[in-house]
Image: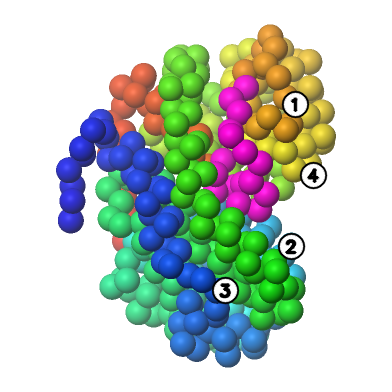
Amino acid sequence: FNTDLGPYRHFMQKEIFEQPRAVADTLHDIDSIDPELFGLLARKRFSEIDGILILACGTSYYSGLTAKYWIEAIAKIKVEVEIASEYRYRQSVPSSNTLVITMSQSGETADTLAALKHAKNLGMTKTLAICNVPTSAMVRECELAYITRAGIEIGVASTKAFTTQLTALYLLTLVLAKLKGNLSELQEIEELKLLKHLPVAMQEILELEPKITKWADKFATKEHALFLGRGMHYPIALEGALKLKEISYIHAEAYPAGELKHGPLALVTEEIPVIVVAPTDQLLEKLKSNMAEVKARGGELFVFSDDASKIEPSSGMHVIKLPGVYGNLSPILHTLPLQLLAYHVAIVRGTDIDKPRNLAKSVTVE
Ligand code: G6P
């Protein structure tokens, strides 16, 4: 495989910029939303289920959390998402009509494999792996599989694996919606068009890098950061916070913005940058009032939004506008600026970006 850095300084940066290609490859050349994309038996299995349980660790767990918002809203199927290391040891209530989905870049994460085994032992035999490594244990051990085509990911902090997982999960959402009669022919055509446009939209967002680099200087001296999002962008805020901790060693937390008043507002001072994922959607007005709560307490806001939101920069409020409003695909696109932010903060802080201290790419022991 190609381990050449090309024009990039780190594999993480290279992998961030590979995402348009990775997502295009993950979508193959699909021209209709078919269950068979997930395996020959998928049509039968998907029609037998009345719920979904997603098991994963780390960044892969956050892709699962995002999918819960999509699948419940669009396909109308109940979804639970659990951290694999918790699920494997807790006494849960199994249901044989549940589809168990394991999310994993490597397909070798010990806790996720053990959680899968545990679910099977509880009688949940309908299993799907969404995984980046076709020869992995996880793909072997699941009945169905969707292989993301991120290509080999070298940076310990996952980037392209995450956005390709999200792409696969959105496809799954559409497949399930179609099977359940919740996706019309017209909607299918429209959704396919949007999916195919995704790599182009990603490319445009990556061009924001110079603006994000400027923000990085403001962050690099801080020791704490708070990330806010709402709805399907809450898991994206979580992923943004995880990226920042993993590679810059800044303590970062993410909160659903509506929960601010139940604790994190007490932390807000000018010393804690507050990063907000604020696309135009039905929660925007709510989010704006959450942002006002932060501002009123002297907090400094760094907002990723778009033109339509009418969020303008002012004192204590920095704004970077993404070039569009992306609807359901917005979580995928809003991930990119957060990756770039973490990357450039880590550059300023001079950490070992591709191999952060104490972390491993793939955790194959418990
Ligand atoms: C490690 C990696 C993370 C990854 C997690 C799950 O912690 O550093 O980047 O998200 O494992 O790995 P998986 O291969 O199962 O997605």
Can residue 238 be seen? no
Q: At which x and y percent is residue 132? A: 36, 63
Q: Which residues are magenta?
A: 319-334
Distance (Cα) linking label 1 and label 2? 26 Å
**Disc marking residue 310:** 1
**On the picture, is 239 further left or further right than 297?**
left
Q: At which x and y percent is residue 78? A: 71, 70
**Disc marking residue 73:** 2
232 and 360: which is toward the camera: 232
Secondary structure, mark 2, is helix
Distance (Cα) linking label 4 and label 3? 27 Å
Distance (Cα) linking label 2 and label 4? 13 Å
Distance (Cα) linking label 3 and label 1? 35 Å
Q: Residue at x 18, y 56 (%)?
A: 1
Q: Is residue 310 above or below residue 326?
A: above
Q: How many marks?
A: 4
Q: Residue at x 78, y 29 (%)?
A: 288
Q: At which x and y percent is residue 296? A: 78, 15
Count neighbours of disc 4 (C-alpha within 10 A) and say few if under 14, some if 14 to 19, many if 20 or more. few
Q: Which amino acid type corresponds to the residue marked 2 in the rendered image?
A: Ala
**Disc marking residue 282:** 4
Distance (Cα) linking label 4 and label 1? 14 Å
Secondary structure, mark 1, is loop
Q: Quadrant of the C terminus?
A: bottom left
Observer-side mark, 4 or 1, equals: 1
Q: Which amino acid type corresponds to the residue marked 3 in the rendered image?
A: Ile
Q: Is residue 268 above or below residue 185?
A: above
**Disc marking residue 33:** 3
Observer-side mark, 2 or 3, equals: 3
